[in-house]
Image (tube, helix red, strand yellow):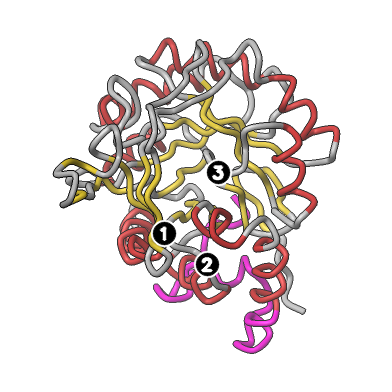
Amino acid sequence: MGDLTVRIAGVELRNPFILASGIWGESGVSLAGAWKAGAGAVVTKSIGSVPRPGYPNPTIETYERWGMLNAMGLPNPGIDEYPREIAAAREAGATVIGSVFGGDAQEFATLAERIAGTGVAAVELNLSCPHAEGYGTEVGGTPEAVAEIVRAVVARVSVPVIAKITPNSADPAALAVAAERAGARAVSAINTLRALAIDVTLRRPVLAHGLGGLSGAAIKPVGLACVWQIAARVSIPVIGIGGVRTAEDALEYLMAGASAVQLGTAVAFDGIEVFGRLSAGLSNLLDREGIPSAGAAVGLARGSAGASAR
């Protein structure tokens, strides 16, 4: 069976399938559930300085064939309450990556320091939510802003820092380059694509917030393109996100240059059992293709070895 072990920024994962932030990570119990189901690591909900209720309903519109549109509004219990959930996940043995969001570099740095103190293996910076005013893409949409935030966080934490990059930019790869130069140990690409749906009978947007973020199968080609471009310009590992639902999807991302992948919409549609299914499927697929390990697949489509060991 193909070896699925990978390393991201010095953190060893038992397989390359990571639970994405915002999906199934509301509590320590749910994070632990994804881990027990076979996830290689789990990313928490994005946590802010204070509790946020999120946007009013409706916040999600699903499309079975091609994905999900959502505008949740970054709901979370706040940094004072959430550490107990991380503790519960860690007690179950999970490799936990803490996700934070903020309105400026100093808020990010303060939150990252707090969440790093809970014992997480790494911190992921949500620089890319497409629909939360004052956060996400609005504060991480330029290389200069990304560099400022990453630099501030790196100065305050000892764990690896992962920058989550937006596709809603003229040059996502430039954002990744800025993150690497500022000290990020890895980048995640991509977050959701800004999108909209209209209810023609009600004559208004389907989501209460109006604009949302599109995820799932429809954005896989965009995610792959971003990973391809980013991997050509950075030397740190890239975590691919967007439309992974099969072992073949995952292998595409690895061959494009990703060292691991995150699952979000697939978990929403298929449940946490998807982790075990995809791990077994990827191992079999690697054997079929004569590839000895997940790490050996990284960058194969570009004729180069990847960054899985960095």
Label 2, label 3: how far apart the Cα atoms are = 14 Å
Horizontally, residue 19 falls left or right of residue 188, namely right
Say whether residue 225 is magenta. no
> What amino acid type is highlighted by mark number 1?
Gly
Q: Secondary structure at mark 1?
A: loop
| Residue that appears at 52% across and 63% down | 306
Q: Earlier in the sequence, mark 1 or mark 3?
A: 3
Q: Residues within 10 Å of mark 3 (few under 14, many from 20)?
A: some
> What amino acid type is highlighted by mark number 2?
Arg
**Contact (CB < 8 A) between labels 2 and 1?**
yes
Label 1, label 3: how far apart the Cα atoms are = 12 Å
Which residues fall within the magenta stretch? 284-310
Q: Is residue 58 above or below residue 200?
A: above
Q: Earlier in the sequence, mark 2 or mark 1?
A: 1
Horizontally, residue 279 falls left or right of residue 99, namely right
Q: Earlier in the sequence, mark 2 or mark 3?
A: 3
